[in-house]
Amino acid sequence: MYPAGVSDILRPRLTRRRLHTTPLVLLAPALMLLVAVGGYPLVGAARISLLQFRINAPERFIGLANYARLLADPQTLDSLGITAVFVAGSVTTVLILAYLISLLLYQEFPGRSLVRTMVMIPWALAPVVNGIMWRSLYAPNFGPLNDALARLGVLTHSVNWVVDYPVPSLILAYVWKVLPLPTLVILAGLEGIPPDLYEAAHVDGAGSFRRFRHITFPLMRSVTLLSLILMLVDALHVFALVDLLTHGGPAGRTLVLNYSIFRTAFRYLDFGYGAAMAFTLTSLILVLAIFYLRASAEAALAIER
Amino acid sequence: MKRARRAARYLVIYPAVAAVTLWTLFPVWWVASGSIRPQYEMVETPLKYLPRTVTFRSYQTALHDHAFLRALRNTVTVAGLTTVLALATGACAAYAFARFTFPLKRPLFLAIFLLRMIPAFTLAIPLFVTMRAYGLIDTITALVLTHTILVLPVCILIMRTFFEGLPVAFEEAAMVDGATRFQAMARIVLPLSASALVVAAVMSMITSWNDYLFGLLFTLSKARTLMVAIADVEGVFYVDYPLIVARGMIGLIPPVVAVLVFQRYLIRGLTSGAMTQ
Amino acid sequence: MRSRRLAQLTLVVAGLLVFPMLAAPLFAQQPIVLRVLDEGPEVGPWYKNAMEYERVTNGRVRVEWIASPWDGIQTRLATSFAAGDTSIDITKTWGGWTNEFWLFFQAIDDRWPPIQRGTLLPYALQPVSAAGHIYGVPRHVTLYYFYWNKRMFQDAGFDPNKPPQTYDELVAACTKLTKTGPDGRVTQWGYAESMDAGSPMLNTFERWLYRAGGDILDARGAPVFNDRRGLRALQAIYDLVHKYKCMDIGQLQLGNGATRQVFNAGRVAMMSMWGSGWAESQDPNRATKDVIGNVGITILPALDLSVTRSATIHGSEGYAITKAAARRGVADEAWKLLQYMTSRTVQLEALRTRGYMPSSLALYNDPQLKRDPYLSPLLAATVEAGKYPVKRFVWSNYGRIQDAIETELQNALRDRKPLQAALDSAAAAVTHILKGP
């Protein structure tokens, strides 16, 4: 018997017994930190988005003009499109791969600790080195990717990965770098499932695949959702890889929104416009977050059943 | 029958492990080999995957660079303190979100998440002004505080998810026995959610470790962090790739060691024995 | 009673003796700290020099070096100035940044009489000039030169001491020197120049444009690079890649460092590159045995001899003093430090170890340097290049303009747009940018 979730009988008793001070006390340290260190910059950034703030002219309040400009700029739609393709491609790829690898790492085999650690290496690699690495791997004539494919007979001539396939190249490099995160989360989720559930199913004669479908996957719903939202937010914040691998090019084909924001603010020194772009991106993620919260609430209820 | 099934398992597992190892380590091997051999060996045709001339010159240079070693130490300190701070405050907050209902719970959670959703560099200038006002430029404190607010929302999110998945029965049993809420949290929930803590800890550590922007902006030379230090030997007219990679490889060691230690705490789920306690 | 008084007396005397020893450091003169933002120590001898300055001034002035890669310096400066920060006293700069940030730099015209400035190469002052004033001191000068691998020339039947002087000669050598392996992949390219986004692409276009007699903006400040001269320049690059197939289209993703790397590995026969390529091609850690000692350096070949024999761009850089330093009252000290950091000895060392050309004219006539077998080809090429246009496009909105032009150039080179259409789109974009918000 596995009583998951909060039982209806006991819930009223819990909340009635304690005053409402306990949650506040628990929340206080986190909130204080966030407000003190993050609150003022957040307000400051919002203020900047309402200004024409260029570095070599005094600031000028222009209200929502930056946002209007954003809506009128064709580059915005272009960036959104590229971002959408990139995010969709990376998140699906990374979640599928993460699931497969987690399932593998969940099995017991000699050397498992080492493999689990090894899998985390891409994540810990310095972004600068990661950039150098992928530039080298993708190098047109003298890169290992082309070389290996040529040796295998798949290619007859060198492919210019970054020039001709910028977004897929970026996705591959990004997936490689960020795969350890969802792998870790999903693995932790798998480890959290009590083994006796599997024992019971095994006794009932269920094979591995059926066990996965009927036990693992349903119980992993909230963890899967968690990985999804983590990856979505991370993919929308990709920066170092774009900067080091493609510079947003070639010809602006990899100008994801986040990179575009950085470029507007720090290269073009148009901080007001950049801040407006940033808050627009944030609103986008906010919408996703609301969907996530709703979905995770449903998942929690499903587990209770 | 059982032996055959075990053999069949290994027939699937080991090739899969080999594939994962190749996927993970080949690119790293390739770039690392660039740090132990002359630059021209990296662009030969056909490509030589094994170095012919091995030289550890870059590593010697890196290890004799005091600024680099100091940056390494700084980053270890910052990542460690960030992880501790984020876990401590985050676990409490996550517990509050998981076990209690209170007014404005949903908006508050979204507001916390808001900070993670904003691109970090948008906050950079106002944050810079704040740090300067407090006199925190070029200090470890500035980095710890900044990194903590970067990772805190995700820590709370991860731990909340796992806390919600734990049955309340254990805490209720403890409270019936007279424990306070805090004691229930500390003695029962935390040990049971070791996996969640591991995930949050590793994630905090790696995020702090990987940070480049705030290290670049908030430090001058005393509190310089690793990611910036690795990159700062790169010049427009003159760049020593082997040295950059060597520094990167040295910088890979502490997080990998930390992960090796942490991942042992990814604990298998509750057993029925504990429940009948 | 008496012992107590004796004890008290002893304590007082001891205190009087000890106190000065403890307090002395507090009263000692604190050194003036000057913060310099530049690339890392590896890049040149300036770091070493700056670190010695404390000893030279007997501890009066200390230099704190803040190393960052190029983009990092830009980001740091933008953030610092936007936030009103005062922590940087001296920063590395070039024409683009000086035009962007001059409001935050301290003009030093009055400290530096024009007569003294006249002892420098004419384009050496561009990195620190903006809005009619001088904001710092030139650090080094560097040009784009033409390099060729003499051994490859010889093996292909060309005279190793006669590099191509015209575009046609370049094409002839380039096509002959491109070799393909048995699996159909190219093992050796004839010619290479970097076409990566983020500067190299625009620089490459500029070099051909100036050789075609064109310019980015005309005298009124309107874009003019899409005229027939600009088309000619772009066509020259396009043909090398697509028509003659002797330059790798992959150069669109290779930066300057990667291009130097393949040249030094003996994979490319000719390249256009900064002067730093000279030092690197003699370095056994970067260049193969076949390359070391077998490299020639000269001016860029002509596109059209009736226009000009050659033209090139310069990548000169300098150090600027910030207004923050002036407000702190250390502008004078900063000026003295810069004089020290860019002295003749340092310029010579930068030349010898890294191939950075000195900014002072006098050194080019130095007989000893002219006899140096390693340095003389580099010096000769620089002097020769000085006879023809040496330009560099800088503007206050440089980043935006650069990205707009590079996007269209790369579109054209990827065969996504006809050349003239690409140039016209770029010109329209630049006009839009120049109009302002």
Image (cartoon, coloured by chain):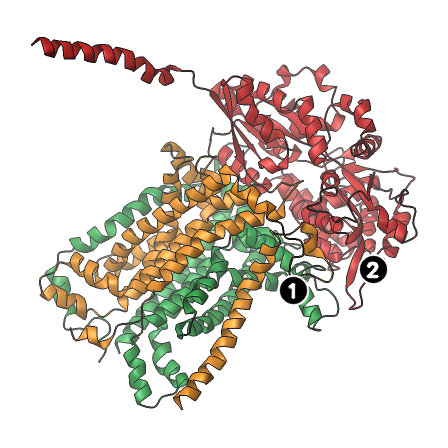
Mark 2 residue type = Lys
The picture places residue B8, in percent across and down from the top left corner, at: 46, 84
Q: Secondary structure at mark 1?
A: helix
Q: Residue at x 25, y 61 (%)?
A: B190
Which quarter shows the C terminus of chain A?
Answer: bottom left
The picture places residue A7, in percent across and down from the top left corner, at: 18, 73
Q: Is residue C219 above or below residue B69?
A: above
Label drawn at residue A145: 1
Chain letter for green, please.
A
Mark 1 residue type = Leu
Q: Is residue B173 left or right of residue B91?
A: left
C156 or A173, which lies in front? C156
Q: Residue at x 75, y 70 (%)?
A: A156
Contact check, label 1 and label 2, Cβ < 8 Å? no
Q: Label 2 crowding class (10 Å Cα cut-off): few <14, some 14-19, many 20+?
A: some
Name the residue at the left extreme. Answer: C1
Q: Is residue C38 left or right of residue A5?
A: right
Q: Secondary structure at mark 2?
A: strand
- Label 1 chain ID: A
- What residue does disc 2 label? C179
Chain letter for orange, please.
B
Tell me the shade of chain C: red
Disc 1 to disc 2, C-alpha distance: 21 Å
Q: Residue at x 75, y 25 (%)?
A: C121
Q: Residue at x 44, y 35 (%)?
A: B222
Q: Label 1 crowding class (10 Å Cα cut-off): few <14, some 14-19, many 20+?
A: many
